[in-house]
Image: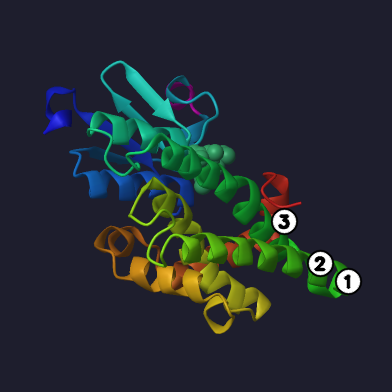
Amino acid sequence: MFSESLPELVFYFNRNCPYAQRTWIALLELNVNFQPREIELGSDNKTDWFLSLNPNGKVPVIEQGETRVYESLIVNEYLSEISGNKLMPSSAGKRALARILMARCDSHLVKTSFSYLAHKSAENLEKEEQLKSELEAELRFLDTVIGESGDSYFLGEFTLTDIAFIPFFQRLAVTLPAFKNFEISQNNFPHLNRWLETMASRESCIQTAMKAEAIKEIYARFLKIDYFKKIGVAT
Ligand SMILES: N[C@@H](CCC(=O)N[C@@H](CS)C(=O)NCC(=O)O)C(=O)O
């Protein structure tokens, strides 16, 4: 296999982190051998040794010999490249679209969903409706993209783009009903919901998923302390 001539790959992660889950899924899907090292967030990631791996102090990071790569979307492209460009489309145009959508996951889906979740409805009902509409508009956009690609995956085949989105949708499937009484599966997003069903049966997504109870518990704690606003993922 392509990656076998390279030094051992160490994967620094935290099992609750959706960005690290992206890399975990890519490692499994690409069948790359790796050594997992779980990092305690709030302590390990503030140490000099971790900051020398990633000056941003965040997971995921991978280390392979002298090479250190961080930022989940970049890490996953690195993993694809050392595996013979698997999990990326073969045409340049589709690869561009794959990158546009991956960037959009962070700039739009993450932002609109965390902003809606983080908003305390009782404080301003008008704002609550506005944030809900913004998330719905983003879900509608993604629904259309999947529909235009033939209903199975974002780009018609399983790629890093599907991997970029799934950790966030796994969490939204729990947090939106629990905290907002909103269920994507009960709404008219036929292509997105079919994609979610397809992804739910994928072994790598099952193996790396957080338990629903753990998601609820962690998010309840984070929402209480306005964590998502503090770290800048919610407006
Ligand atoms: N843009 C980064 C985000 C990574 C990130 O935010 N990771 C969080 C955990 S989910 C983290 O390590 N936080 C530690 C901290 O900020 O102290 C990526 O895509 O890798």
User: Residue 66: image x %, image y %?
Assistant: 30, 15
- Compared with residue 4, is residue 135 higher up or lower down, i.e. above or below? below
Q: Quadrant of the N terminus?
A: top left
What amino acid type should be assigned to the residue bearing mark 1?
A: Glu
Work out whether residue 45 or residue 207 is closer to the camera in this orientation and state it.
207
What amino acid type should be assigned to the residue bearing mark 2?
A: Gln
- Is residue 141 within the magenta segment? no
- Compared with residue 73, is residue 140 higher up or lower down, i.e. above or below? below
Q: Is mark 1 within 8 Å of ligand 1?
A: no
In three-dimensional space, the C-alpha distance between marks 2 and 3, rounded to whole angstroms, equals: 19 Å
Work out whether residue 90 or residue 195 is closer to the camera in this orientation and state it.
90
Residue 41 in view (yes/no): no
What amino acid type should be assigned to the residue bearing mark 3?
A: Asp
Circles 2 and 3: CB distance less than 8 Å? no
The residue that label 3 is drawn on is 226
Badge 1 crowding class, 10 Å Cα cut-off, few under 14, some 14 to 19, many 20 or more, is few
- Is residue 49 within the magenta segment? yes
Badge 2 crowding class, 10 Å Cα cut-off, few under 14, some 14 to 19, many 20 or more, is few
User: Residue 219: image x %, image y %?
Assistant: 58, 63
Rendered residue at 68%/57% (across/down): 112
In three-dimensional space, the C-alpha distance between marks 1 and 3, rounded to whole angstroms, equals: 20 Å
- Compared with residue 133, is residue 233 higher up or lower down, i.e. above or below? above
The residue that label 1 is drawn on is 126
